[in-house]
Image: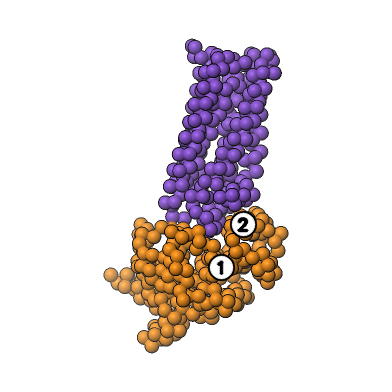
Chain colours: A purple, B orange
Amino acid sequence: MKNLLINELRLSASPLSYIFLTAALMTMLPGYPILMSAFFICFGNFHTFQNAREANDTLYSVLLPVSKNDIVRARFVFIIVIQSAGFLLCAALTALRMTVLSDTKPYTGNSLMNATPVYLAFVLLIYCAFNILFAAGFYKTAYKIGIPFIRFGSAVFILVAAAEILPHLPGLTFLHSPKGERQGVQFAALAAAAVVYCVFTAAACRISQKRFEKIDL
Amino acid sequence: MPVLRVENLCKRYPGFLLDNISFSVCEGRITGLIGRNGAGKTTTLKSIFNLVHPDGGEISVFGLNMPADERKIKQRIGYAGGAVDYYKHKKLRDISRITSMFYGNWDDSAYRKYLDAFSLDENKTPLELSEGMRVKFSLTLALSHHAELLVLDEPTSGLDPVSRAELLDTFLFLKEKGVGILFSTHITTDLEKCADDIVYIASGKLIAAKPLREFISENAQAGNGDSLEDIMVRYEKESLYEKLAD
């Protein structure tokens, strides 16, 4: 497993998976749908799938003395590592916006979503959509990436739209507060999203393993 | 002693049936797998590596069952599907370094020896190598963990005559060391130079699995020709003739 992870990091991974972590900086953009940061972080991981496919990594990996289950698990561990790094960056920048920069003008007059715990919850839901719709979708064939990506892209559109609309609904305007009002509710939403992420990512990994095992290569 | 035993292997695809294929490969012997395009050679080889899932039959390698003992088997077996066609933009050094981590019996001195013997430059990428050199790198990886069985899918296809001759010399050297070799090819003259046994598949059915000399002499006596190529052409043309006549 450790060796497969090293294989992921040194051979399979697209440099874009690492470079697109900088998309977390979008968290700081006022007047911008900052949830796109999560999309771009997932887009980096998409490039790793594409890179590995073009490099014929599947054939290389299955010929090694490893189980097919471990090959899939290593890819998921890689995805989770990148997503976690992206999440931590987004969380650090969200904390910065909610504290030191909370009274700064661009953010107080921001018409689009502000960085709050609910923003981080939506980041996790977008990651979740990637894992269940794209990654598990990819392992139906281990080479088709187009349709799974369209499904993931559609889910992102719905999630970003929902995140942008919610604070404008009656009773939910606190979601838009630069200081993160009603933090108890917001952190509860974040915790719920974290649980959803863990459950669905574990399920996505298991589904992918079963699908990959059935494929004739 | 058989290092590979395939018994009643069946695999069904839409429009194709690999039907009850049985044969074995012994240590220190070279077995050639022949047949036309689409005959089922690659499906057979892929089944041995659990790359495709057979619908029936059993595969045992070193007395271990595939796929139950897949990891143990793969530690002792090498596969080269012709030239290396993965990670074409990575340096050979990087590919071999990663590959070596997976094998408990990886022998770096053997790796260096084969690199040197095949004149492979570790700083090159597979993309910068000729077809023949990529086959040699593929073999280098397989041999550096002291594979006791080599399974090769058309390793001589696309090679010039000199490279093919060098490769056949390599096979003969490995055979002397006790390595069992199973390789598929269309180039029947290569088999006549080095193979001990022959497995012949036509349209998914096993035509023969026996010592090469015995196969040739039987067919020569039956008037089917005295070379593998003549025999294959005779078998395949007859079946086409029957199809057209129906």
User: Which residue is depicted at the point 47% across and 35% down?
Assistant: A200
Image mark 1: chain: B
Q: Nearer the viewer, residue A36 or B14?
A: A36
Amino acid at circle 2: Met
Q: Residue B245 location, x and y as percent?
A: 30, 72
Question: Relative to A116, does residue A206 appear above or below in the rendering?
Answer: below
Residue denoted by label 1: B147
Residue denoted by label 2: B101
User: Which residue is depicted at the point 55% across and 14% down?
Assistant: A182
For the residues labelled 1 and 2, the Cα–Cα distance comes to 15 Å
User: Which residue is depicted at the point 65% across and 27% down?
Assistant: A92
Crowd rating for badge 1 (residues with CA inside 10 Å; few <14, some 14–19, many 20+): many
Question: Relative to A153, does residue B119 appear above or below in the rendering?
Answer: below
Image mark 2: chain: B
Kindly state the secondary structure of the residue where label 1 is placed. Answer: loop
Kindly state the secondary structure of the residue where label 2 is placed. Answer: loop
Q: Earlier in the sequence, mark 1 or mark 2?
A: 2
* Quarter of the image where the C terminus of chain B is located: bottom left
